[in-house]
Amino acid sequence: MKFRPNAMEAVGALMVLSLVLVAILAPWLAPYDPTRAVANTFGDPAAPSRMYPLGTDQLGRDVLSRIIFGARISLTVGVAAMAVTMTIGVTIGLTAGFFGGALDFALMRFTDVMLTLPALLLAMAFVAVLQPSILSILLVIGLVSWTQIARVVRAEALSMTQRDFVVAACALGAPSARLIVRHVMPNVMPIIVVMAVLGTSGTLLLDAGLSFLTLGVPPPTPSWGRMIEEATTYFRVAPWLAIFPGLAIFYAVLGFNLLGYGFLRRRARAASAL
Amino acid sequence: MNMHPRRHTRSAKGRAISTRAAAIRRCRFALALIAALIALPGCRSGAPPPQFPPGAMVLKLAAISDVPTLDPAAGYDVDSWMFEQMIFDTLIRYSDAGVDLVPDLATAWESSPDSTVFTFHLRRDARFTNGRIVTSADFKYAIERVLDPATRSKGMEYYRAIAGAEDFAAHRAKSVAGIETPDAWTMVFHLIVPDPIFLQKLAMPFAAAVPREAVEKWGDDFSRHVVGSGPFMLKEWIGGQRIVLVKNPGYFVKGSPHLDAVVEAIGVSEDLQWFKFEAGEIDVSNIPPAVFPYVMKTPRLRDLTLRIVTVTTRYMGMNCQMPPFTDERVRRALNYAVNKPKLIAVLNGRGIVANGVMPPGLPGYAPGLSGYPYDPARARELLEQAGLGHGFAATLWMPADQTMMILGQSIQQDLDLVGVRLRLKAVAFAPFLEAVRQPRTVPLFFMGWEADFPDPANFLDVLLSRHQWGANNDTFFSDPRVDALLAEAAPLSDLARRYALYREAERIIVADAPWVFLYYPITYEIQQPWVHGYVLNPMRPARLEKVWLSPHPAS
């Protein structure tokens, strides 16, 4: 069957792809060094101009260059944190769903407890203890956002274990590990991918939120959340300082969301076609 | 006192803000909105606000958190002092706009040439608001109360040089022998060591006259039932809601104060204060950093601002016990490497480049110091000489605060150009103060010092002498020449000679460079066009007895 992306998938994929390209090509795309002062606009941010298309901030740094380099941090943290999230969520979900019983009960109640804790507050507490760095932040985000994934994966895995082919493999004496890896996992993979893509927009936002609360990647590394935080001082005289990084976050989140919902729609169609 | 990044002016309480996480402050805007919704008319809770007759002149203020105390023996922060100086009188006080001493309850005073005997003559027409005349015994009682360990007053150290103070504090004497009250209107202080700044210490609210009968009646509750002789008296203080002061009709200065009352609403965040100011609901306000650039770019608002260079110095301390800052060349290099005029620009002009330890406005200030101009080439040269031509990495500690973080990034940019890679570490204010006091812990840190009294000793001695290691000398700087000069200057009452010695000590300190001398901050407040006679003081909260209001919409 030929792969025909639906509109949401196509637009989402293009947006995400463009972000990835910007992040990879940042040193070539950015007109200036994002950490150095390139204009004498100290304490008096400059509006967008031909030389500085998105203006310069109160430390004389080029906003466009900072947004371009900020994409690196946002994507790295967003995607890597999602990888951590997935590792934890899928492991717990599969284990609970496949083995069921007391283990399932214990793991799911633990997940419920985690769900009741607000992710942002939990992340703030973790970061405050761990000291902000890229590694600590992506670990922390992963640690606080795996719950939804664990629940969905568990539900899928649970239904898989009832399917004939799994029961058959089990009857043939296949060990649990083989059952999970060869039979259950491949069949829950599509939903895992959808959850991962959708979840990335969440981790991106969480990263931006932590940065805004000055708990993100420490300066001088440019990050979108911190750009907005620093712009609050000038919001009434230089709103563009906050608006452009805000748009960047919006763009990234929208891209991942479109892509994720596109996948979801494809699954729904496929399911209804059966 | 150590200065919090936001100068603890009337509403920005040093202690209150300092203990909150920076994160919480980031949510201020949202909280302000919620608070604004809750405060909508109709859903207001608590006691009804006090009613004043039409035409009454009421100054309306707002603050984030409650006044810590009104007891002069207890208060040691700008917020308490603001109200204490309205309710109580000291013998002498600072002038409205300066750091020179003027009479308060004393009409005249003399000091012996060696600064060990101080005589005061009191006015005879001052009464406490309970009707009793204020006498010298009331001042003696106030100081004995501060010296009594049971009071646990932070002002104790200032009066220990009075003869017999130690005996009194140790309960070996019933009263302080060195405070004589030959009659109700005369007071004589005898000191065991010369103290040329004893007058300044008597101008602190700790030494304000309090009536013994009221203190003994209320005990620990005196703070809520204060009785003083000052221009205003306490009418109502509802914790967490508001504090109301009304005119003292018996105040000894005829025709003063002009205001009928002062009402401060408590629990109003900085941003909400700003909204209230813009709505004309409060008369004088701080300017939150988030609107400062907007205010300065709006002529209508800019014209309403008041500006004062406070007696404060901000610096970046370098720990002289931690390599590479043990090397004077490295410390000097950093001074050349930091672009200070840029810092001032980043602060939107709220500062003056510092060339030394002592701020302008401090008596003894040395205007001739050249300091360290911005010269990265010279900085690289010095680092080269110190064997650090390849650069090094260091961590700059700072109180968690948006402005500090921006300044830190500016310095980070500057030092990057000379090969010094700076890591910025933001810490809550209380643990920050704790950390810098530990030896060999904090290599670089932002710090500020605001004068307790106007004398060079309050900066040089307190911040840079050997005996303050682990207390206020956070750079662990020590130079025998400086210590010798400070010891020589301390007892001198000949001001010319005293200041000359302090300036010599400062010159050596600047050359040794334990600090990167950053800037002297400028504070701004904003007042409504109908407020008159409101004057900022460089070292103390503004006094309100000369303030008056012309008719205005909200009145």
Image: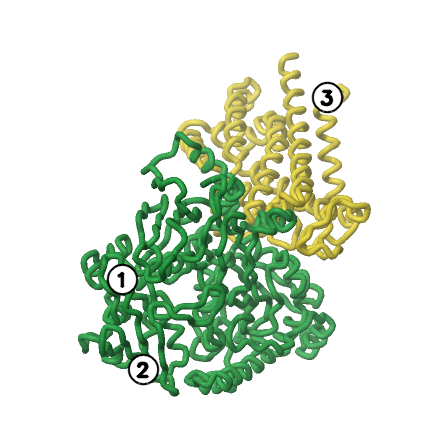
Chain colours: A yellow, B green
| Residue to which mark 3 is pinned | A6
Secondary structure beneath dot 2 equals loop
The type of residue carrying mark 2 is Leu
Residue B48 located left or right of residue A127: left
Please give the name of the residue rendered at 75% of the width and 54% of the height, measured from the top-left corner: A33
Front-most of residues A111 and B61: B61
Q: Is residue B431 left or right of residue B390?
A: left
Q: Is residue A175 visible?
A: yes
Task: Point out the frontmost of discs 3 and 1.
Answer: 1
The residue that disc 1 covers is: B127
Q: In the image, residue B407 lies at what x, y percent?
A: 61, 59
Secondary structure beneath dot 3 equals: loop
Q: Amino acid at mark 3?
A: Asn
Q: Are marks 3 and 1 in contact (CB under 8 Å)?
A: no
Using residue B550 as the reference point, say whether residue A190 is left or right of it.
right
- Residue B191's disc is 2
Residue shown at 79%/49% (left/top)? A31
Whether residue A103 is visible to the viewer of this picture, yes or no, is no
Q: Chain letter of disc 1? A: B
Q: Secondary structure at mark 1?
A: loop
